[in-house]
Amino acid sequence: MKIVRRVIRKAARHRAKRRGIHPPILNEAVNFEKRCIFIAVPKTGTTSVRLQIRPQGPPLINNPHLDIVQVRDLLYVHLLRNALGKNRAFPSESTPSNAEIRDQAAATFTDLFKFSAVRNPWARAASIYSRREGVETREELSFADFCAKHYYASDTCIHPTRHRNQLDWLCDEHSRCVMDYVYKLEEFDKAIGEIANRTDGRIILQNQVANKNPESASRSYRDLYNQETKSIIAKRFEKDIDHFKYAF
């Protein structure tokens, strides 16, 4: 494993030095120096955390909203890419085999601290309705019509997925949540201390405001709902509500 890591790091440094730029990164979700993966579920207040976590360099995948399985699988692609240097020695026993790279990807995924944020589904739906980026709906639909058509957790997002619940970003193929820590946006101040403790001070976050929409109705979201729309969101995002113990 040490040989694999040494070869991968050496290849990455060589390419960066030759080009005079930062070496390529996997994605802004992964910071190898801080040894963490941050899964940014859309509209859960993650912009400020992403800005504090992301490393510098051109990303292999330029999408800030990857799920944990996508990041896990991209680790192999990233390590393979960094290991594919030119052969400069004979015999070439220092070159890692494909099996060694896959083992290293699996070991790296296990080692990295995996965390994310979730949000009250009713407040989150109101935030998505009010959003200014991606597909804007506020001027096109009433809130009742929006709720009727709001099937997926990233509807209207510039990087949409078919994930219905926030939990879908955080689970593997067997519906098991594989995150080390998931905090509620509503309890971010508490989460800052918990994350610092769990990482032995490796990850120190600040409660900064970024990408704030002054027109968002999420802060007074209850005023938007009637009994019908409240029930629509409750039924559609029941998995999140049950798992994270949210109430209207």
Image (cartoon, grey):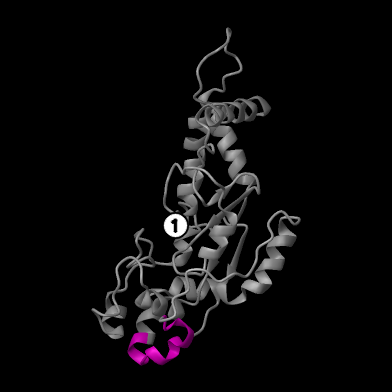
Dominant SS of magenta comes to helix
Q: Nearer the viewer, residue 182 or 15?
A: 15
Residue position marked by numbered label 1 in the rendering: 65
**Residue 29 image offset from top left, x and y in percent:** 52, 52
Quarter of the image where one finds residue 143: bottom left
Count of number-bearing discs:
1
Magenta region includes residue 223: yes
Q: Is residue 88 above or below residue 151?
A: above
Quarter of the image where one finds residue 53: bottom right
Q: Quadrant of the N terminus?
A: top right
Q: Is residue 83 above or below residue 156?
A: above
**Residue 102 image offset from top left, x and y in percent:** 53, 33
Q: Residue at x 51, y 42 (%)?
A: 25
Q: Is residue 22 above or below residue 52?
A: above
Q: Nearer the viewer, residue 103 or 189?
A: 189
Q: Residue at x 47, y 53 (%)?
A: 174
Q: Residue at x 56, y 37 (%)?
A: 105
**Residue 235 image offset from top left, x and y in percent:** 38, 78
Mark 1 Cα shell of 10 Å, populated few (<14), some (14-19), many (≥20): many
Amino acid type of the residue that numbered disc 1 sits on in the rendered structure: His
Furthest toward the left, the residue is 140
The local secondary structure at tag 1 comes to: loop
Magenta region includes residue 225: yes
**Residue 220 image offset from top left, x and y in percent:** 46, 88
**What is the magenta range?**
216-229
